Image (cartoon, helix red, strand yellow):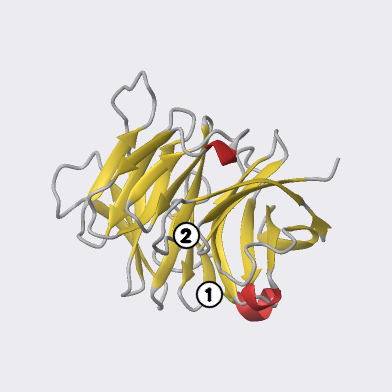
């Protein structure tokens, strides 16, 4: 495992306990959502300067965020009151165009929705049953979807023709046993199409590891080229992470209220 060095950090300035719930990689810099119901955008070269943009959401309790267009800084947020919002974080904002997205819920179902369909009874074009409450679900590429449950079970699905409807194409099972971790923070596809990266943590050991999920004829774990964040967020859980390959930088967000930047030692 190759360790990275922490080079910058920012903590949300409040007397109340605030969690950073998720971090989303955008071309303009990392965006975060936090338990104080805010969507924030940061300069990747200066986290300590604080957010360059702070927006208050209206979801009751915000629960998730996704980039629909990372190049153009278009982000979707959702929360406990059932609302979904699309935000354009550019100064020269244009209307965002979104076609397909995933939803996951506590009933274990992952739905693929097409926003171009106006009939609300027909908007769900495919459903996968993960058999366990969904923690995260998203597209890895044009047709393949991952789902990770609250009990850390990971499976991949494919909406392309030729695959059995609703069945997992790859089932990794309980990742705690597979990786020797305590939790999976999230999974992000690599921008160049070369697989994905799994973020696995063990807060009791103050450890967090980025593991490459390679894409060949099948998907496979590459533990030999994993990257570690020494000390991570102390004993607090790392809620999310993102990476910028060209800049060789990783950002992490935790329940300690910190956003941290990491890169290889010079």
Measured as percent of width and height from the top left, residue 219 is found at 65, 59
Pick whichever, 126 or 259, lies toward us. 259
Measured as percent of width and height from the top left, residue 53 is found at 40, 34
Pick whichever, 211 or 160, lies toward us. 211
> Is the residue 71 above or below the residue 219 in the image?
above
Q: Is residue 151 left or right of residue 97?
A: right
Residue at image coords 62%, 52%: 196
> Is residue 52 visible in this depiction of the protein?
yes
The residue that mark 1 highlights is: 152
Q: Are marks 2 and 1 in contact (CB under 8 Å)?
A: no
| Residue 179 image-quadrant placement | bottom right
Give whichever of discs 2 and 1 has the lower sequence position: 1
> Is residue 171 visible in this depiction of the protein?
no
Pick whichever, 230 or 102, lies toward us. 230
Residue furthest to the front: 15
The residue that mark 2 highlights is: 163
Q: Is residue 43 left or right of residue 202?
A: left
> Is the residue 126 above or below the residue 105 in the image?
above
Residue at image coords 66%, 81%: 177
> Is the residue 19 above or below the residue 160 in the image?
below
Q: Is residue 5 left or right of residue 120?
A: right
């Amino acid at each position: 495992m190759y360790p990275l060095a922490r080079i910058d950090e920012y903590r949300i300035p409040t007397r109340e306990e605030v969690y950073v719930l998720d971090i989303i990689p955008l071309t303009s810099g990392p965006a975060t959502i936090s338990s104080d119901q805010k969507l924030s955008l940061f300069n990747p070269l200066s986290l300590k300067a604080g957010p360059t943009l702070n927006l208050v959401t209206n979801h009751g309790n915000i629960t998730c965020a996704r980039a629909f267009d990372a190049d153009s800084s278009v982000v979707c947020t959702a929360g406990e009151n059932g609302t979904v919002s699309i935000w354009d974080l550019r100064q020269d904002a244009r209307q965002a165009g979104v076609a397909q997205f995933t939803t996951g819920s506590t009933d274990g179902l992952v739905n693929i929705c097409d926003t171009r369909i106006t009939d609300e009874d027909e908007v769900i074009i495919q459903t996968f049953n993960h058999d366990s409450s969904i923690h995260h679900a998203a597209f890895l590429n044009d047709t393949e979807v991952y789902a990770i449950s609250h009990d850390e079970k990971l499976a991949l699905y494919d909406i392309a023709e030729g695959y059995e409807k609703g069945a997992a194409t790859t089932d990794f099972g309980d990742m705690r046993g597979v990786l020797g971790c305590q939790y999976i923070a999230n999974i992000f596809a690599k921008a160049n199409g070369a697989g994905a990266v799994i973020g696995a943590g063990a807060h009791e050991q103050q450890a967090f590891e980025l593991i490459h999920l390679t894409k060949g004829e099948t998907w496979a774990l590459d533990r030999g080229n994993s990257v570690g964040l020494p000390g991570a967020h102390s004993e607090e859980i790392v809620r999310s992470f993102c990476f910028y390959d060209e800049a060789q930088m990783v950002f992490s967000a935790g329940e300690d209220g910190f956003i941290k930047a990491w890169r290889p030692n010079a």
